[in-house]
Image: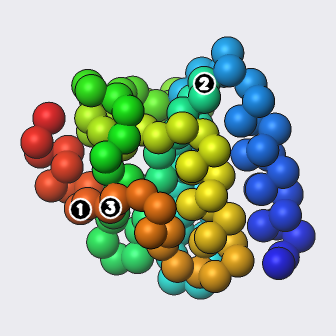
């Protein structure tokens, strides 16, 4: 595992304990794939980008949720994308260790999921 991957995992583990934090996005790229994590208070989502964007589904949020994507930019993410933070950490660990998508969550086209809102 690269030093960058280790640092990102440590950051996400630290953030997982911060239940008061705002909702914000962080990305990690490995090869041709970028995994973006939305991290919120006790929840989060994953967005897998490999030429197509896939977002976690079957989650807790009944309504779309807004995350900060850059310092002054926000984006809405679809209902059902958020899972308990421990599940999202598992998605990240799977990506870092095996470079593939976790089967512990459902995945749907981000574009299609966003249109259903």
Q: Which numbered disc, 1 or 2, marks the residue that appears first in the sequence?
A: 2
At a point 12% along the width and 45% down the height, the residue shown is 115
In the picture, residue 97 is in which quadrant? bottom right
**Residue at 15% across / 55% down in the picture?**
112
- Whether residue 24 is visible, yes or no, is no
Quarter of the N terminus within the rendering = bottom right
Q: Position of residue 28 (x, y in %)?
A: 63, 63
> Marks 2/3: CA distance?
22 Å
- Numbered badge on residue 73: none
Few, some or many residues within 10 Å of mark 1 (<14, 14–19, 20+): some
Q: Is residue 108 left or right of residue 39?
A: left
Q: Which mark is residue 109?
A: 1
Residue where numbered disc 2 is placed: 41
* In this view, 112 is above or below 38: below
Residue 41 appears left or right of 1: left
Mark 1 → mark 2, Cα distance in angstroms = 25 Å
Q: Residue at x 14, y 35 (%)?
A: 117
Furthest residue in direction front, as rendered: 104
Q: Position of residue 68 (x, y in %)?
A: 50, 31
Numbered tag placed on residue 107 in the rendering? 3
Q: Quick check: 9 left or right of 75?
A: right
| Residue 88: x %, y % from top left | 57, 50
Name the image quarter holding residue 94.
bottom right
């Amino acid at each position: 595992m690269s030093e960058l991957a280790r640092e990102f995992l440590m950051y996400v583990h630290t953030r997982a304990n911060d239940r008061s934090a705002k909702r914000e996005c962080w990305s990690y790229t490995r090869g041709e794939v970028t995994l973006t994590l939305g991290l919120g208070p006790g929840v989060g989502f994953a967005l897998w980008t490999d030429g197509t964007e896939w977002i976690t589904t079957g989650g807790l949020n009944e309504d779309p949720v807004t995350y900060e994507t850059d310092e002054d930019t926000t984006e809405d993410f679809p209902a059902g994308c958020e899972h308990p933070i421990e599940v999202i950490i598992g998605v990240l660990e799977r990506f870092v260790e095996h470079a593939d998508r976790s089967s512990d969550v459902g995945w749907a086209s981000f574009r299609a999921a966003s249109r259903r809102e």
